[in-house]
Image (tube, rainbow, N blue to C red):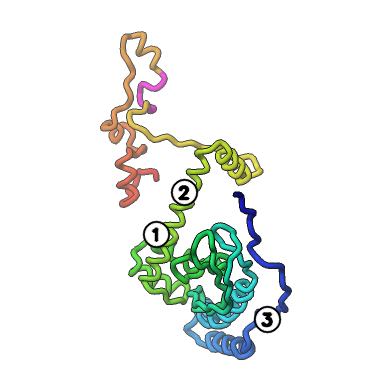
Amino acid sequence: MMIAPAPSTVPHVCHDLKSFLPAQRESLLRGLAGQLQASTRAAGQNLGHLEETLLRGGHELFRQMLEKAAQVKAAAAAPFCPHCQSQLRRLTQGHGTTIQARWGNIRVERARGYCQRCKKWRFPADALLGLPEQGTQSPGVQEIAALVVSKMPAPEAEPVVERLTGVTISAGTLARAARVQGQRAQEKRQHLDGQMSTPQGRHQQDRDLQLQLPLDPFTLVIELDAWNIRERDEHWGQSAALRAAGQEPAPLALGLRRHLLPLEPTRADRRRAARDPEPGHRQ
């Protein structure tokens, strides 16, 4: 039986702009302005200190605004299962959760319902807010964790994240969030592979890729790297004459490339040059 897709949100409800502003916005802004004033009067501080003041001093202002906006978004979630789109039963309101966001923890109240098809309790607002099933990290924190942990171990990434964003995220949280993102990437890859196994899926993928292509003309450059490929040596352009003389022009041996063509790095040279560049090597 086909199930029609459910709307992701309930009918739009107009909210006054003031409902998104912090209750103590005047005192927060004055406090932030006072920090900026003190920084401008300090002889040893420059623009970087002003940036740091805004980055760290504005956290509470942004946190309160984010909390209000997230609550409005959560209240607009439709009572449908985010997985099978079935209507949820036994709905109850007021189930709070603490979300770790870019500017600190926020508190959001949302509804919970039971999906008879999945046999599970669901929070439709969590899917609408982009929260993982296992964890309470915001999409922004998930992205930060995935990026930094892909470049360095989580214990080393913790102070880097705090220095760049001003938010303290433990190494364990970074590792869990990055693992969740990795699992989601694997699931998406499996989903795309499944689509490509059917004619309809391949057609849809081709259509999606064509829509992503730039409208302006472009040049497609394909670079090939292989072993024993003929290169411009002293016999270049003389293949016909060599064959007429009974000689077969052989590819330039890999071991001779270093001596005959010092400006053309070999495959091993490229790896070494990436670590320890030397004069005469093109990268």
Q: Residues within 10 Å of mark 2 (few under 14, many from 20)?
A: few
> Which residue occupies the foreground of this view, 252 or 172?
172
Counting the numbered discs, the total is 3
Label ID, residue 150: 1
Cα–Cα gap, marks 3 and 1: 38 Å
Label ID, residue 19: 3
2 or 1: tag closer to the N-terminus: 1
Q: Position of residue 16 (x, y in %)?
A: 72, 79
User: Which residue is located at x 56 percent, y 78 percent?
Assistant: 109
Q: Secondary structure at mark 3?
A: helix
Q: Position of residue 190 (x, y in %)?
A: 46, 48
Which circle, 2 or 1, is nearer the viewer?
A: 2
Residue 214: quadrant of the picture: top right
- Callout 3 amino acid: Ser
Q: Is residue 171 above or below residue 279?
A: below
The answer to whether residue 120 of the structure is visible from this angle is: yes
Residue carrying label 2: 189
Residue 36: quadrant of the picture: bottom right
Residue 240: quadrant of the picture: top left
Q: Residue furthest left?
A: 255
3 or 1: tag closer to the N-terminus: 3
Q: Is residue 112 above or below residue 28?
A: above
The answer to whether residue 104 of the structure is visible from this angle is: no
Contact (Cβ within 8 Å) of mark 2 with mark 3: no
Q: Secondary structure at mark 2?
A: helix
**Magenta-drawn stretch, dominant element (helix, strand or loop):** loop
User: Which residue is located at x 65 percent, y 43 percent?
Assistant: 216
Contact (Cβ within 8 Å) of mark 2 with mark 1: no
Contact (Cβ within 8 Å) of mark 3 with mark 1: no
- Callout 1 amino acid: Ser
